Each structure stands twice: as structure tokens, then as C-alpha cells.
């Protein structure tokens, strides 16, 4: 499935709002630099040390609504080639 820019920006906005209100306040300085993947629809999330944390949540949900961010720096960069080919 190919997401339109509007669908993608809505998904990103939902995930970012949830990150700011519910996830970020729970994190400490020990979590700096870690990756967080959020299902923009269900609000399920996982945290890990690498981008591969995306696979952890995807294996559980098979959701197309996953958004990957790096705490505390919100990075709008692209997913790695491996992630973008696996998660569609």
C-alpha cells in the first residue's frame, strides 16, 4: 500500500502528539538516542536501541501505521532501505 502525503502527515501528526503527551514524559536521560516506534492508530509503542525496534512492533501488529522516531531528537529522515522494503 502506498500512502499519500496527506495520509502520511496525518499518521505522523497523531504519533508525534502521542509521543509528546504520553511517551516523552515517561522517558529519562538514559533513553536519549533510543528509537521509539508508535502505531499511530492504536497508540501501541516499543522502544529499542536500533531502528530494528520497528520490526518488533510490526511483527506483533502488521500495522501500516507505524512511525519511527529517535528520542529526544525528532528525525523526519527516511527509514533505512531494509525497513522501507519490509514494512509497507
Image (spheres, grey):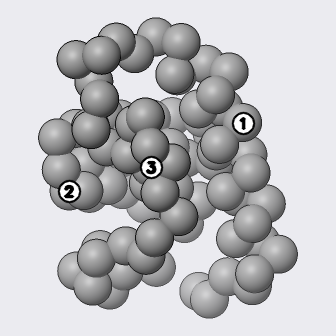
Is 86 or 33 nearer to us in this picture? Answer: 33
Is 11 or 41 nearer to us in this picture? Answer: 11
| Rendered location of residue 51, percent (x, y) | 24, 56
Q: Which mark is residue 46?
A: none
Name the residue tied to disc 1: 17
Q: Which mark is residue 52?
A: 2
| Rendered location of residue 69, percent (x, y) | 44, 49
Q: Secondary structure at mark 1?
A: helix
Crowding around mark 1 (Cα neighbors within 10 Å: few <14, some 14 to 19, many 20+) is few
First reached walking from the N terminus: tag 1 or tag 2 = 1
Given contact means CB atoms under 8 Å apart, are the residues at marks 1 and 2 in contact? no
Classify 27 as above or below 33: above
Residue beneath the point at 65% across and 42% down? 16
Residue beneath the point at 43% across and 34% down? 72
Classify 3 as above or below 58: below
Name the residue tied to disc 3: 69
Answer with left or right where residue 39 lies relative to residue 53.
Answer: right
Q: How many marks?
A: 3
Q: In which quadrant is the N terminus drawn?
A: bottom right
Q: Quadrant of residue 78?
A: bottom left
| Rendered location of residue 84, percent (x, y) | 36, 80
Q: Secondary structure at mark 3?
A: strand
Q: Secondary structure at mark 2?
A: loop
| Rendered location of residue 82, percent (x, y) | 22, 80
Mark 1, mark 2: which one is toward the viewer? Answer: 1
Crowding around mark 2 (Cα neighbors within 10 Å: few <14, some 14 to 19, many 20+) is some
- Rounded to the nearest whole Å, what is the CA distance between mark 1 and mark 2? 22 Å
Asked if one can make out residue 86 in the rendered structure from this viewpoint, the answer is no
Classify 37 as above or below 5: above
Mark 3, mark 2: which one is toward the viewer? Answer: 3
First reached walking from the N terminus: tag 3 or tag 1 = 1
Residue beneath the point at 64% across and 28% down? 20
Amino acid at each position: 500500500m502506498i500512502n499519500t502525503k496527506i495520509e502520511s502527515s496525518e499518521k505522523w501528526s497523531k504519533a508525534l502528539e502521542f509521543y509528546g503527551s504520553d511517551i516523552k514524559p515517561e522517558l529519562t536521560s538514559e533513553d536519549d538516542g533510543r528509537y521509539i516506534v508508535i502505531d499511530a492508530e492504536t497508540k501501541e509503542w516499543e522502544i529499542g536501541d536500533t531502528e530494528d525496534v520497528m520490526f518488533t512492533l510490526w511483527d506483533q501488529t502488521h500495522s501500516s501505521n507505524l512511525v519511527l522516531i529517535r528520542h529526544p531528537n525528532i528525525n523526519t529522515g527516511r527509514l533505512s532501505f531494509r525497513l522501507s522494503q519490509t514494512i509497507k
